[in-house]
Image: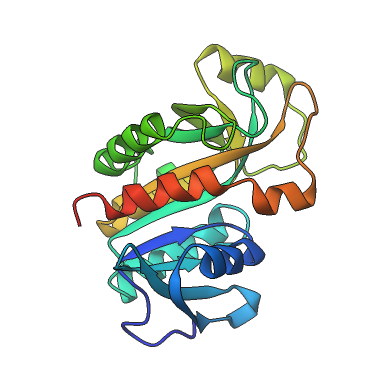
């Protein structure tokens, strides 16, 4: 990244899409300034409720989010990252426009094995972030017309692969949604000594095919961003 040391705040919101990062900076942070734009991956730093806070796009997939999260934790002194992305719902109880707070991340990636030789890591968020986010979501329930769920997600390396039998098995085990980054973020946070969480807006439903439009994806994440920022601030 092109940011100079000290240009990222210790608290970071991390959407996947650079356009989403710009929108968060413009509408959610005060006095936001661009601190990096290498390869079109936009990062901004400003304040929220008077506390320094940054937003940085992660790109798509575990390899991309792992690079940016590692650099933030290792080189920029970041302490907490909350992913604010999208996910596809699995069970009928989760609807498009709902929010899922990921209490664990199952995955078909090798990320849980390669970071600690011979051991498969449990990929889970910071309990402090999870608890704060869940409490905030319960308090603010219904502001944007959706329900907030807390539970496991499945982080897949394969966006277009059709696997109904796998999805059935995951749903039977309580998995709420499918996405592509949470497991990587949780793995990196555990390795680097940071804290992480994923707060996801449901943009489509794996079973029904219902989906938000591209425009709605850009504007329907206010609940997730508010919840994520509250979690980041926590006991600051």
Please give left or right for residue 117 compared with residue 163 in the image.
Answer: left
Question: Which of the two residues, 179 or 157, is positioned nearer the viewer here?
Answer: 179
Q: Quadrant of the C terminus?
A: bottom left
Residue 158: image quadrant is: top right
| Residue 3 point in image, percent of width and height | 44, 84
Residue 106 in sight here? no
Query: Does 234 appear above or below 171?
Result: below
Specify whether residue 96 is in view: yes
Quadrant of the image occupied by residue 11: bottom left
Q: Picture coordinates of residue 222 (x, y %)?
A: 55, 48
Closer to us: 35 or 58: 35
Task: From the top left corner, tell me how far across and down residue 218 is, in percent.
Answer: 68, 54
Residue placed at 58% from the left, 40% from the top? 201
Q: Is residue 38 left or right of residue 182?
A: right
Which residue: 76% across, 36% down? 161
Front-lying residue, 7 or 182: 7
Does 191 appear above or below 197? below
Q: Tell me what residue is drawn at x 55 percent, y 62 percent.
A: 58
Most distant residue in the left direction: 235
Residue 59 in the image: x percent, y percent? 61, 61
The image quadrant of residue 8 is bottom left
Q: Is residue 149 left or right of residue 131?
A: right
Furthest-top residue in this view: 172
The scheme the figure's colours follow is rainbow
**Count of all numbered marks drawn on residues in the image:** 0
Residue at x 33%, y 72% (from the top left corner): 9
Compared to residue 114, the image places residue 55 above or below, namely below
């Amino acid at each position: 990244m092109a940011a100079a040391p000290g240009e990222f705040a210790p608290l970071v919101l991390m959407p996947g899409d650079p356009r989403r990062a710009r929108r968060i900076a413009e509408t959610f942070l005060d006095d936001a300034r661009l601190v990096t734009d290498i390869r079109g991956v936009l990062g901004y730093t400003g304040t929220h409720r008077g506390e320094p806070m940054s937003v940085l796009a992660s790109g798509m997939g575990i390899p991309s989010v792992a690079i940016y999260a590692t650099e933030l934790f290792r080189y920029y002194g970041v302490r907490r990252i909350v992913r604010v992305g999208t996910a596809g719902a699995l069970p009928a109880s989760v609807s498009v426009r709902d929010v899922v707070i990921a209490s664990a991340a199952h995955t078909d990636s090798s990320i849980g094995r390669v970071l600690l030789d011979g051991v498969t890591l449990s990929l889970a968020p910071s309990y402090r972030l999870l608890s704060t986010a869940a409490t905030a979501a319960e308090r603010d329930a219904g502001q944007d017309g959706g329900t907030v769920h807390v539970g496991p997600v499945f982080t897949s390396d394969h966006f277009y692969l059709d696997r109904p039998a796998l999805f059935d098995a995951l749903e039977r085990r309580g998995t709420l949604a499918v996405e592509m980054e949470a497991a990587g973020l949780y793995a990196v946070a555990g390795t680097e000594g940071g804290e992480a969480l994923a707060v996801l807006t449901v943009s489509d439903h794996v079973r029904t095919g219902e989906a938000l439009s591209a425009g709605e994806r850009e504007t329907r994440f206010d609940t997730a961003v508010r919840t994520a920022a509250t979690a980041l601030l926590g006991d600051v």
